[in-house]
Image (tube, rainbow, N blue to C red):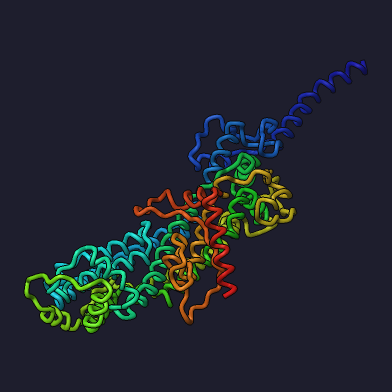
Amino acid sequence: MCAMWKLQVALCTLPMLLLSLSCAGESKARSCSEVRQAYNAKGFSLVNVPHQEISGEHLRVCPQGYTCCTSEMEDKLNQQSKQEFENLVDESSHKMRTTFVSRHKKFDEFFLELLDNSEKSLNSMFTRTYGKLYMQNSEVFQDLFTELKRYYTGGNVNLEEMLNDFWARLLERMFQLLNSQYHFTDDYLECVSKYTDQLKPFGDVPRKLKAQVTRAFIAARTFVQGLMVGREVANRVAKVNVAPACVRALTKMLYCPYCRSLPGLKPCHNYCHNVMRGCLANQADLDPEWNVFIDAMLLVADRLDGPFNIEGVIEPIDIKISDAIMNMQDNSMQVSAKVFQGCGQPKPSGMGRSARGISDVFNARFRPYTPQERPTTAAGTSLDRLVTDIKERLKESRRFWSNLPDDICAKGKLTESDDEQCWNSHTKGRYFPEVVKEGLTNQVNNPEVDVDITRPDTLIRQQIMALRVMTNKLKNAYNGNDIYFQDSSDEGSSSGSGSGCSDGCTTEFVFVGTEAPVIGADRSDERAAAAAAGKSLCCGPSVLLMMAALTLWALQTQWR
């Protein structure tokens, strides 16, 4: 009887026990309504998204407790994390990248317009002053400006040889005009050109103009190439190669809170730093070379704004050439006598035309534009304002790549400002691990991203090499040297197209010759950095011989 009563009690208690166990299970499985709402807001379908938490043994990235995420959701959030990271880097680097694009365009337009206006000014003034004589010989001057433009746009032009050729051609034409009563053969005129350096028929103008033009054009061309290389490097590096380990870390930081029913919880600040420094380790390694490149750009900008001022060289070029013509006319008697003595007496032309009529034309003194008449350049922009603007923007880009994780992880933007109320990779709470230093080798101790420090990114290494090549060109341009053409024709200087530094020009760099790529005249978007990187990796015999010769020159220069 007693046993029967105990059995009845047990049977009555069992449903209540089962109900209590069921209620306990339901209290652990929280609602996923907030997660569903946030997940749908990302553009994902709610099909197969649980309404309540489920067991999380299937998760491969997020914590495997009770979860609102299925395997399919975790895969989609993986892809979303990668895309958002790429967008974050793109947005953070947008201002810096557009700076290089816009300033390259502005400087390029300014320079070419300055050159065009100078040519127009010369043509107008010489036509007005010398009339038909100039028009009959205008191709000499047109060729000068054509070659200057070709050099600036990347053509393989030796500035010194080109300028020497211009003065030799001008001497031949003027010598014939001033001695039109004689007939000159091509051989005779070639003999005349050989006396250019000895007689100095144009006075000191060619020497001074050559020094000014070569230094200013070398600086301007190298500077605009630097802006282009900076643009290409920044564009390539900003397109990040997101490794699988980085994607996992990003998903865990950005979207594992969804799986823990905490979709509105932002990551802790230091946690974000470790993830971003791991994902952007290779970009940080670019930073030292990038900073050296920016510093070299700033130094060349100082030259453009000072002793190598291209505006001060190009604008009065018509006046300087006219001065040279006046010198030739004033010394025509002595020049002709010495040429006749050295090259022989020419045969009369039989035209019966005296030289005095021609001389009278040249005696019509050249009247330059007044400031009001002279054309404005680049829509009224002056070089100093343009260069100052570019320098300010360049300074802002220093340490950009090492600071990129800081910019992305700015508090209140991507991360939580309250260090106690943030996602720490597992739950809501403080993040305790220390923040690792930037750079690839320092990621060996990164607690969030598994980085293979033995495999640096190939693209980043190529961009580092491109920056080194460009920096070397900038350092040589700073010293007034063009590293494409090296000789010893200018009083012991081996600057080639460059003329070195004159008095008052302080050099802070040691000249180092490096074979660098010639930027194509079309300045296409794909050539600069890639060509630089490719050529820098070449170490053929010709390159080694060149470097040896240049090193020897540098030592000789120091001994003098």
Quadrant assignment, res 183: bottom left
Instruction: Say which of 331 and 467 sits in front.
Output: 331
538 left or right of 523? right
Residue appearing at x 55%, y 42% in the figure: 82
Q: Quick check: can you spot residue 261?
A: no
Residue appearing at x 49%, y 69% in the figure: 298
Instruction: Say which of 436 and 176 sits in front.
Output: 176
Number of marks drawn? 0
Residue appearing at x 66%, y 41% in the figure: 260
Q: Is residue 361 above or below residue 554?
A: below
Quadrant assignment, res 231: bottom left
298 left or right of 52? left
Horizontal and vertical percent position of residue 106: 36, 64
Q: Is residue 195 above or below residue 20?
A: below
Instruction: Say which of 411 and 386 sits in front.
Output: 386
Horizontal and vertical percent position of residue 542: 52, 51
Residue appearing at x 60%, y 58% in the figure: 402
Q: Quick check: can you spot residue 136?
A: yes
Instruction: Say which of 71 and 474 sits in front.
Output: 474
Quarter of the image that includes the N terminus? top right
Horizontal and vertical percent position of residue 433: 74, 53
Quarter of the image that includes the C terminus? bottom right
Horizontal and vertical percent position of residue 111: 33, 66
